[in-house]
Amino acid sequence: TNELFTTITTKINKWMQDTLTPQMDGFMDKITSSLMSVLVFFKNAFLGFIISIYILIEKDYIKARFKRLIYAVFAIHTGNRIIRNLRFVDEKFGGFLIGKMIDSSILGLICYLCMLILKMPYALLISVFVGVTDFIPFFGPFIGAIPSFILLFVVNPWYALYFAIMILVLQQLDGNLLAPKILGDSVGVSSFLVLISIVIGGGLFGVLGMVIAVPAC
């Protein structure tokens, strides 16, 4: 009995030293790394928020100094062309981002109301996710709909079927009525260029590249 107990204890100690301890060390390293990433994200977000406030307060001063710098470095006709092009870029990016924000918010609100009427679970969570991902042109509806469909399918397959039909109708409504009405001519590129620009932007800069790809194109 003592020999058996000693053998079991030895094997347990060996397993803890060779297997459990390295796994726990790796697990704690992952937790620490994830926690640090979250803290760095919130630190950067807070810092960006503060900097944004200062930029908004001092925007007229910054704009005037930047314009003086352009005319100090470049000739007058070159400076005029740079200022004109920057205003064009601001108009395109600003029009697209503000218009798309309004469009995505309306789509998310309609999705939320429809899910409440159909008594689906996770209405607020899914509607926010659909609205945020709709900010990405072309691929946004698929990015938002697929995880939501899977979530509802786990709860009830009928909910997933209703959601798929509902989101298909909403995307047709958004693509053919809301988006063209709200965005208007703020972008003005063909569907082919939209697809190519999103693929390239997403490959180079991830989700952010997919968002800014169309107005950049």
Image (cartoon, helix red, strand yellow):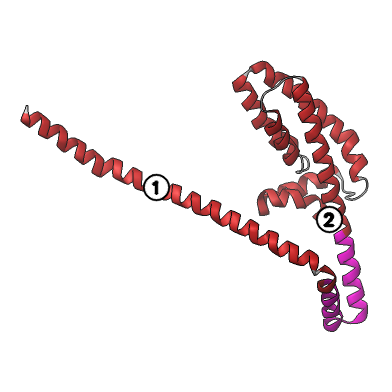
Dominant secondary structure (helix, strand or loop) of the stretch shown in magenta: helix
Amino acid carrying mark 2 in the image? Phe
Label 1 sits on residue: 28
Is residue 50 visible from the viewing direction of this image? yes
Q: Which of marks 2 and 1 is in front?
A: 1
Picture quarter containing residue 19?
Answer: top left
Q: In this view, does 111 lie to the left or right of 32?
A: right
Total marks placed: 2
**Residue 120 on the magenta span:** no
Image mark for residue 93: 2
Vertical placement of residue 110 versus 26, above or below: above
Crowding at mark 2 (Cα within 10 Å: few <14, some 14-19, many 20+): some
Q: Is mark 1 on a helix, strand or loop?
A: helix
Q: Say which of 52 and 169 sits in front.
A: 52
Q: Which residue is drawn at 81% across and 30% down?
A: 110
Residue 46 % position (x, y): 64, 58
Vertical placement of residue 111 versus 61, above or below: above
Picture quarter containing residue 64?
Answer: bottom right
